[in-house]
Structures are given as C-alpha cells and as structure tokens.
Amino acid sequence: QTHTQPPMAAMPAHVSAAVTYTATTPRPDGRKPARVAGSLVPHRRAPHHRWATVRQQKRGGRLNNNAALAEDAPASDAKHDTGPLSSTETLTCAVFSTSSYMRHTQTNVLEEAFGASNVRSLDVSLSPTTAPLAAGCNAVCLFVNDRADAETIDILADLGVRFIAMRCAGYDRVDLDACRRRGVAVARVPAYSPYAIAEHAIAMMLALNRQLMKGHARVLQGNYSLSGLVGFDMHGKTVGVIGTGKIGRCTAKILLGMGCEVLAYDLFQSKEAIEMGVTYVDTVEELLPKCQIVTLHCPLMDDTYHLMNDEKFNLMKRGSMLVNTSRGGLVDTAALGRALDTQKIACVGMDVYEHEAGLFFEDKSEETDATPGSSLSPDWDLGLSALASRPNVLVTSHQAFLTAEALGNIASTTVDNLMEFAGGGG
C-alpha cells in the first residue's frame, strides 16, 4: 500500500463552537494564534494535504438508498451564509458513520436535543461521493475516519453546511485550511473518558504478556498444557509512556498502582504526572532502550507521523512490547513488521492502524470479488491480516473508546457544541 501522510494542523482543544470558529476563520491583523493545548503540540503549523486512498464505501441495501439520495440531491449555486446560526434559523444536522451501538447512546441524545426531524442519521462515512447526502443541512456530525478533505469541504460548503461537529478527539482528516477558506467552523470532543482508553491499553498489555489469546484458543481445542504461555510480572518493570495528556496520565496512574516504574516523554511535562511519581526523560530516544513496555498516547501531527520507525524500533530493548491506542499513523506499519520479524520487539497491541480509513468500523467478512470460489474482496488489507495473524500481535478495531460512559460524554459534548453554533456561537 502507498504510505501517505495525512494533513496535520493544530487547533484549540476548547470545545466551544465560538472559539473554534475563530480558529478556523481569518484572524484580524496582529491577533496572535490561539494557544494550542495538548501533548506534543508546540504550535500551529501549515497542514499537509496528502490523503491515503479511501477504500470503496460499505456495500448493502441501505447504502444503495443513500447513494440514490446523493445522486438526487439538488445542486445549488446559491451563496450561503457562514458563521453561527441566527435566531431565525433552525439547526439541521447530518450525522455520518452512524452505527447500531449509537442508537441508545448518541443518536437519541441528538434527536432529543434538536428534534428527530432535524437529525439525519446516515450509515455511510463522509466522502466526496456521500457529501451530497447533507443537502439541506447546515451542520454535519463526523467520526474519526470520515473524510473531510478540501474536495469534501467544498461540496459541503456549497450545500450550505457551516459547522462540523466531530464526535471524537481526532481531527487529522479534517482540512482546516479548507474550512477556514470556506468559513466552516469546526469543534471536537477533546476529552470524553480518558479512563476508557487507558484501561484498554492496560488490557492489551496484560493480554499480550500473559498470552491470553493463545491460552484461550488452546482450551477451545481441548489443550490444557502450559508450555509456551510463560509471562512476566508487571510489578517492578519499567514502562514508557509517550504523551502525558489526560489519557497518558490515566495510563501512568494505573501502571504505578501495579508497581511499575513509569518513564515518560512529552514536550510539555505535567506537574500532576510528576507528583504521582512519573519520571520524565528529555527525548524519545532516551526512553526506548530503558523500557520493557512502551505505550503511545500522543496526537498525530507532522512531528509524530511515523514516530515509531526503523530507527526507533532499533533503539527498543530486545523482547519489549509496544502498545498503540492513539493514532495509527504514529507507527510505520512496514517497520513494525520488520521489528517483529527480527524479534527486536516481542509483541504489539494495536487498537489503531495507519490505513484503517474505510476498513475499521466496517464488516468486511461478507465481501468478495466476482470470481466464483474466491473469498477476498479487492480491497482486503493483506498487510493488516498478516499482522493480525501473528500469535504475538493483538489487534482491535479502534474500540478503546467504546464504553457506555465515553459514548454518553461524547454525545453530551457534541450537543453542547451544536447548541453553541445554533445559539449564535455562545
């Protein structure tokens, strides 16, 4: 697969639509950029506009209906307003990438806040092909892998969309320059449940260390032997945490409670982390050779894209573990394969994957090509399949956030963001 770097840009962590709108529209002369909060985010940088190819949209009857709606959507050359809604306007929102788990945790919250007739739930991801489904809406609600590049933003803006509410923390697939150019405001959910993701990272560490997948598979086949299942005590081991924002600190706190020594790297050292017993080092290169386990909790930016590459893997302690529950692009997948092949690292836990767009959150098991007897679709990801088939690799499909508490918090903050936009920007 072609390795492409997604666009990166810094934006304020504040969830207010009014504040975020200021950040995505031209600033008056002499006004300083908004200060960026968050780990490993030194300052605003111009984004790169290179996009990985998004796989073919989900197949099925409902998608065909949505596609028909997109084709029938009225084209509009009218000049649309920008900025928050006026008191005479009603918010109408198209929610892309909806799933069944949202029905009782998020969709109902949006419909209760704005009225069911003003919320359009779509089970397809956003792309230039599906963007016309937002016709008649002044806002869209997107998830982490929805494609909001310049082409898509132009289509949305031409339809009258003025606000993008991300129901996630990540925004690396949103072209902020295009939003600024078209006057489209953007808000996100910077924190919803750091505990959910931290606990998932710890679960991956324990499952890999104690070889739970292998042990469970043996029992299913009537094999109750213990050979080949030896793990190690977490207590007393040194764990490296790269990125000590809320999630990184939650992870560190759990590790400290297990008796681990925690080393950390972040451009912005946390007083809270230091007080709880975390020791900071000056560089990632200093951290890697000292740790039995390394866990990633930093954002995906220009400086962190392929943070873990051949050079970094070569610095890791032989037989160590890597866990990534942050962003797939932090890890060079090809380099990871080489590190596993040479047993430079013993195992890896991945909740994210750099080519996950169009793959994660979808059911690919029923797809095939047109050749009788074939069982693979044309866009089957052979690289991920090869990784996931290894007994020392644990892959989950971006589910670390998926707790009832996190879903509720995401819905609540998303409604707050949309309310500010609907109420004139707060």
Image: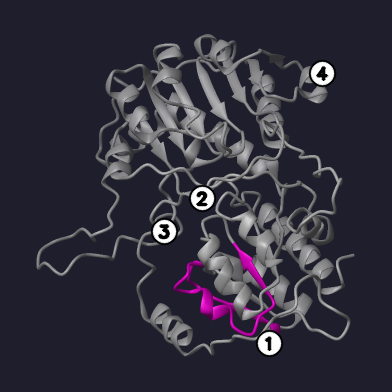
- Check residue 138 for magenta coloring: yes
The crowding category of the residue bearing disc 3, from other C-alpha atoms within 10 Å (few below 14, some 14 to 19, many at least 20), is some
- Between the C-alphas of marks 1 and 4, the distance is 50 Å
The circle on residue 358 is 3
Q: Which residue is mark 4?
A: 275
Q: Earlier in the sequence, mark 2 or mark 3?
A: 2
| Label 2, label 4: how far apart the Cα atoms are | 40 Å
For marks 1 and 3, give the CA distance.
28 Å
Label 2 Cα neighbours within 10 Å, binned few <14 / some 14-19 / many ≥20: some
Residue 332 image position (x, y, % from top left): 41, 33
Q: Nearer the viewer, mark 4 or mark 3?
A: 3
Q: Residue at x 22, y 65 (%)?
A: 368
Left or right: residue 131 compared with residue 318: right
User: Mark 2 highlights which residue?
Assistant: 49
The residue that mark 1 highlights is: 117
Hey, what amino acid is under mark 4?
Glu
Q: Residue at x 45, y 13 (%)?
A: 315
Q: Nearer the viewer, residue 313 or 213?
A: 313
SS category of the residue bearing label 4: helix
Instruction: Based on the picture, tell me whether residue 151 belongs to the magenta stretch.
Output: no
Measuring 66% from the left and 12% from the top, which residue is drawn there? 281
Q: Position of residue 58 (x, y in %)?
A: 38, 69
Give the amino acid type for the residue marked by disc 2 in the picture: His
